[in-house]
Image (cartoon, rainbow, N blue to C red):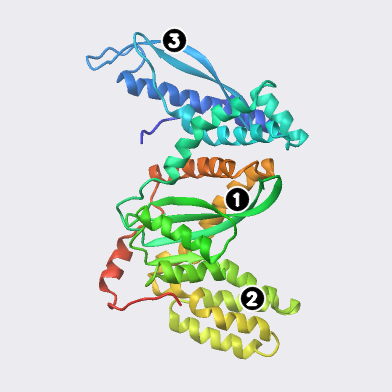
Amino acid sequence: MAQYQINLDSQLLHQLFLGNAQDAGVAKLLESVLNQILQAQVTEQLDAQRYERTEHRRGYRNGTYPHQLHTRIGTITLSVPRIRGGKFTTELFARYQRSEQALILTMMEMVVNGVSTRKVSEVTEELCGTEFSKSTVSDLCKRLDPIVTAWNNRPLSDSPFPFVLVDALYLKVREEGRVRSRGVMLGIGIHTDGHREVLGLMLGDTESEESWTEFFSWLKTRGLRGVDLIVSDDHGGLVRSIRKQLQGVTWQRCQTHFMRNILDASPKDLKEEIHAHVRAILEAPDPQTARMLLNQTIAAYGEKASKAMRILEAGFDDATAVLSLPEKYRKRLRTTNSVERLNEEIRRRERVIRIFPNRESVIRLIGALLMEQDEKWAAGKKYLDMAEYHEWRENRPKTTAKVT
């Protein structure tokens, strides 16, 4: 990916940090950055700086034209370069606006179906104008939906995914005149080269074993393979599906959820003490030390917090499965936090929508968001350096692991 040097003037920075004009400052900052990127892109396309004389030049600048971009922090105006006798091309608008388009389309669907709140109506009218119909919304959806659907059903990379993290969240969807709760299942994979990839999303009627089985079968038909460790919470249907669909894979129970389960069952006056002991177990340097700390904790609190200790003992092996990996991989694979962060971004948009007008709008909005995140990950830094993992895997005893 091209690297661009961005310059910020003192007036812009002053606007950005004014307490009562922060949104305006952020909008101006975004406008300045994007305009500088456009200028850098036209230089790249022409292979020449402004006024530069070179035999490699592929054309000449011919001024700019204004292009307005609507965002949640305000409307910004971009100066799009013109090229004499040619056409300047950039993916900036399409890439930046994809999730914005999905959000606006979902709100428009709510309006035309008569289920919007006053706030949604006001926002939609401001962004899109007051004149739009069901046919207008349908035509706009036809432009975006195939792009998101094609991405969500794309063949996965030829590379194996040693580590996979899965999670689900619930949304409200209007179906047949009723509002129903539906589960959205998400998967993230980590390549053998250390980059993350969004594997896909699927909307299910419930977070049942059948729904998760369908989800994993779908991922496998698209190319999911080489999974060594899968991280998730302790949902019964999910774990049973992993056993059936990903046989031989080690299951790591999310330690954040595990700790929460233990503390919920702990007496109030012992929560802090038990939290410290359980944290020491989960962060032990090796499985043997973790087992020793487990026995000490159960001996100390077996009578005073019997329910919490039963949960700790029953889930110990699954919650400490990650201790079998080299230490540098444990922190990022002990929880589903990276999926949870994606869920938070989804929730930000869901709070605007509240109730999705139909199933298609769920896939469109969440898919567009995940699609953009996937692009950032592909072009960004590696999530993990996998060299030590490959060496560890090559030298470890040739035994068959299984989900416990």
Q: Position of residue 351 (x, y in %)?
A: 68, 44
**Mark 3: which secondary structure?**
strand
Q: Quadrant of residue 113?
A: top right
Question: Which of these two is toward me, 1 or 14?
Answer: 1
- The numbered mark, 1 or 3, whose residue comes first in the sequence reads 3
- The numbered mark, 3 or 2, whose residue comes first in the sequence reads 3
| 25 relative to 335 in the view: left or right | right
How many neighbours does mark 2 have within 10 angstroms: few (below 14), some (14-19), or many (20 or more)? Answer: many
| Residue at left offset 70%, top offset 49% | 179
* Label placed on residue 262: 2
Q: CA distance from mark 1 to mark 3?
A: 41 Å
How many neighbours does mark 1 have within 10 angstroms: few (below 14), some (14-19), or many (20 or more)? Answer: few
The answer to whether residue 104 is above or below residue 199 is above
Amino acid type, label 2: Ile
For label 3, the residue is 63
Q: Position of residue 239 (x, y in %)?
A: 50, 70
Q: Position of residue 148 (x, y in %)?
A: 47, 39
**Mark 1: which secondary structure?**
helix
For label 1, the residue is 344
